[in-house]
Image (cartoon, coloured by chain):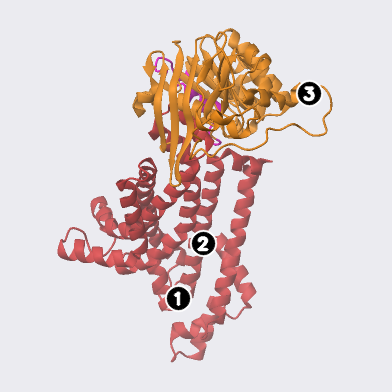
Amino acid sequence: MTGSLAASDLSVRYETPHGAVHALRHVDIEAHPGEVIGIVGESGCGKSTLVTALANLLPANARIDGSISYNGIDLAKLDAHRQRLLRGDEIALVSQDPMTAFNPVLTIGDQLVDFQHHRKDLSRAQKRARIAAMLGRVGIADAERRMQSYPHELSGGMRQRVAIAAALLTDPGLLIADEPTTALDVTMEAQIIHLLRELRRDYNGIIIVVSHHLGVIAELCDRVYVMYAGEVVEGGEVDAIFHDARHPYTQALLACDPARFHERLDRLPTIPGSLPNLTQPPSGCVYAPRCDRAFARCATVAPPLVNLVASHVARCHAVMP
Amino acid sequence: MLAYAVKRIGLGLLILVLVMVAMYAAVFLVPGDPATVALGPRATPELKRLLIERMGLDQPVWWQIIEFFRNALTGNLGYDVWSNRPVSRLVLEALPNTLILGLTAVVVALLIGVPLGCLSVMRRGTAADAVIGVLSVGVIAVPSFVVAIYSLLLFAVTLRWLPAIGAGEAGDFVSQAKALVMPAAAIALGWIGYIARMVRASMMEVMGEPHIRTARSFGLPEWKIVSKYALRIAIIPTISLVAVGLGSILSSAVFVEAVFARPGIGKLITDAVNTRNYPVVMGTVLIMTAIYVSITIAADLLIARLDPRVRDVFRG
């Protein structure tokens, strides 16, 4: 089954003994079948909270406001049981660190059989046959033998391939890859990106790729959302974001990407300042304290999401449609 | 795995030898030689010399130890000073009662303790978790002989549901099972609490690991995550705990067998120590040590079986 995904006015806060942490505030995103959506931003910007909310895996102390509509169902309003039935069936997650993503005392085959538990129509032998075929598809030679292996007997790159295979085995309508290459070295990263590019050709659901790596996003995605301090500050087609960024934060982020420097620099550029405290988010623009184009209104009034050309949006007082 | 097993068994044999050397040293150091104690103060010197020769006490201690092991290898553990019956026969008669008692206690403790620990984790932070926690600490704190005496008063004296002493009629399963209930419960009770706490603690740690999140992200039901994905890892410290704890279970069997006048190794060894019946003490200690060492080896092999990472450490 495939359907569209839309989060509207989505806010998530974590209740802690030191007060609520407003990790995600008034986020609007949408994704349609066949699209690959990128979510980019620095550490602590709310990327992981957003995808965790989409995958219905938020911890017990999280409170959610707004709606996540997937295929006409509001995921935020489902009870725990209905949410569980969607996980691993309609929605699959490839988690961050392939080194720790699998149970260390069960074989790969055993775990991948369990992960297909929603498919009551298949026998154990059929499930194993599907695993062997899928492992071959993600580029693992000797699939039969690898199913007998324990996770620690596989390399990091191989484990990430297995994680992707596990997610694809469930035929999800929504596939979320949370930092799929962050824990890998550069060669492995290139191979995994290549694999994801190949897979998207015959996959017609939604793929969401989270990364702090601009290159990964540029190579894989159709559209991008840039996040800062729990808000989506800019969104649009990959080309628009990378060549015509309008939000000062996106521009600063692109200016800091080492891949874009043509000559040697003595000192890598950085964005001065640090993230605001999310227990008390600022009343104005979240980026204003670090923004070199901020003016008086930025500190007091939260900027609206300004519609630019096509699907290009930016949350800034300084941009004009 | 095989090399590992061989290494562990070799180490176990070494422990056996060391324990017996220590036992001989202890007997050697205790004032009064066994022959005098056995025969009493008014024995004739001839009789005494005869017994000393028969027990091999005129030989140097190291020779006695070698003789002991040589005989033990052929199944001869010496003779009871009083009844002149072979020690191996005495031990073999007493052993089944104690093993049944100890194993029943451990199995019952595991069957109740492990699910309680799992339940605590699945209902963490709720009233059920708190009640299990308080009860666990409570039963750990009560010594097994206190449980033995109070249950004796309640179930045997007041209610007359269960027999107060003995191990039941030979060949009568129901009567033997009835006689087993209180002694086994007295030993098991504290262990239920111990195991429940242990399982809960290690399970809480495992439940925070990323692979549990993976299992959740595939929508696996919580009971399956707890019973398969978490328990297989969380049970490992509990196995070590129980294997080591079997030593203390067997020593609490000494008290419990005394309270319930239940024939068994515990009773055999207390009687033998009280009457300075050294061959019986030696033979019993050897067998008990051998059992204890085998259990520890079995537990280590079981852990290697459950955790492939441990297996690989010993393979490589």
Span of residues in magenta: A104-125
- Badge 3 vs badge 2, beta-carbon distance below 8 Å: no
Residue at which label 1 appears: B277
Coordinates of residue B284 in the picture (x, y in percent): 47, 66
Which hue is chain A drawn in?
orange
Counting every numbered tag in the picture gives: 3
Check disc 3 and report the residue beneath it.
A261
* Distance CA(mark 1)–CA(mark 2): 18 Å
Position of A30 relative to B198 (above/below): above
Instruction: Name the chain letter of the residue that bears numbered label 3.
Output: A
Give the amino acid type for the residue marked by disc 2 in the picture. Answer: Thr
The amino acid sitting under disc 1 is: Asn
Residue B311 occupies which quadrant of the picture? top right
The chain letter of the red chain reads B
CB of mark 3 within 8 Å of CB of mark 1? no
SS assignment at label 1: loop
Q: Position of residue A243 (x, y in %)?
A: 68, 14
